[in-house]
Amino acid sequence: MMPAIEKPHVGAGFTTSQVSDAKRARIARLDKHYVGFSRDRLLRDTLRSMVDSIPPNDYDQLDIPDKRRIVAICGESGAGKTRALIEHCHRIPEMRPYVDHDQVLVNPVLWFKAPSPSTPQRLAFAGLTALGVPVRANIAENKIWQLFQTELKRHRIRFVVIDEAQDAIETANRIEIVKIANAFKNLVQMQDWSLRLVLVGVPPLAEFLERKQLFNRRLVVPFERISADAEVGTVVTILEKVVVDHAGMTLAKDLGDDFEKRLAHACDGQIGSIIQIVRKALEFAIEGDEEQLTLTHFANAYRSFSGCKDDENIFEADHWRDLDPFTALRRDGDLNYIVARSTASKSRSATRRA
């Protein structure tokens, strides 16, 4: 079952009673729109190729490598991978729920998150749980994977989507990683049931996919951060789509010459995060009965997401290029703790060497 699109929440500083039903509906509509980019063509074509690779007769599957059996969507957090995949899965008829000839509703897509920390056993357990199959947590590894394959066929699942797939291997040891790779290979090579696998995640997922069990069976769709050369044009496109086309609002003219670069920097160049912060700024404007988006709205949105100090807000500070959005939440006490922990770690290492 594909996850529902997360709806925006009421912004900080406003109580539920202060936000009318009309405003809440307007805020909720923002997230229903999808902003596509050139990368969407590759994702669409790759998914379409994967769907078309399923043979009419399940028993016709040959035990040969096929790069369309596993699709991997790789990119950093905030790149917009999951949102894009949800959108394109909804657009492909073969991936949508249908009523079969017995009048039974069938959902051909099983979507679940990889457990963290993960083992081959816990991964299969997560899949069975997502299917709604009761299973003991201590069932043997080989038996739980056999049961998982049986239930996938029984539920007529054609596509397994594992989100946060890097969690399946990030904490696994070398033996477990090999087992997981083999398990993925076996899922897409079932002789009597054609199934395709979609893996969504951040590094080290790309490294994992280089393994020989998977290399000749996968297609990769990279979701990369925008480059310095492309960031202004991409941000302008996002602003026009989200602010003007979707929200029906306007941008203030005094945002500053470097506003687009500030916005890209605040989101580490990740397109999904840029869209989120623009929508959050719109949320503040809607709650305040304003139809024009100002720098203050973006500063409040960034403050809401990052927890930054007032004098370290990327949208307001003169030294914004020196500010790291990933460490915006830190305070003096946190820095003291980090230094103390580093000093203690070096001391322990020196003692062991001695």
Image: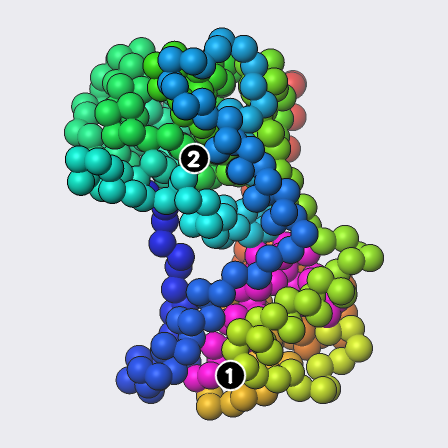
**Badge 1: how crowded within 10 Å, few (<14), some, or many (20+)?**
some
Query: Which image quadrant for residue 137?
Result: top left
Q: Is residue 126 visible?
A: yes
Measured as percent of width and height from the top left, residue 231 is found at 75, 60
* Residue at 38%, 13% in the rendered image: 59
Identify which residue, 129 or 313, lies in the foreground. 129
- The magenta span reads 260-287
Coloration mode: rainbow
Relative to residue 86, is residue 238 depicted above or below? below
Measured as percent of width and height from the top left, residue 353 is found at 65, 19
Can you identify the residue that label 2 sits on? Answer: 162
Relative to residue 183, is residue 241 depicted above or below? below
Q: Amino acid at mark 2?
A: Ile
Report how far apart the C-alphas of labels 2 and 1 lie in the structure: 36 Å
Q: Amino acid at mark 1?
A: Ala
Q: Secondary structure at mark 2?
A: strand
* Residue at 45%, 22% in the rendered image: 55
Q: Secondary structure at mark 1?
A: helix
Measured as percent of width and height from the top left, residue 68 is found at 55, 26
Measured as percent of width and height from the top left, residue 326 is found at 61, 55
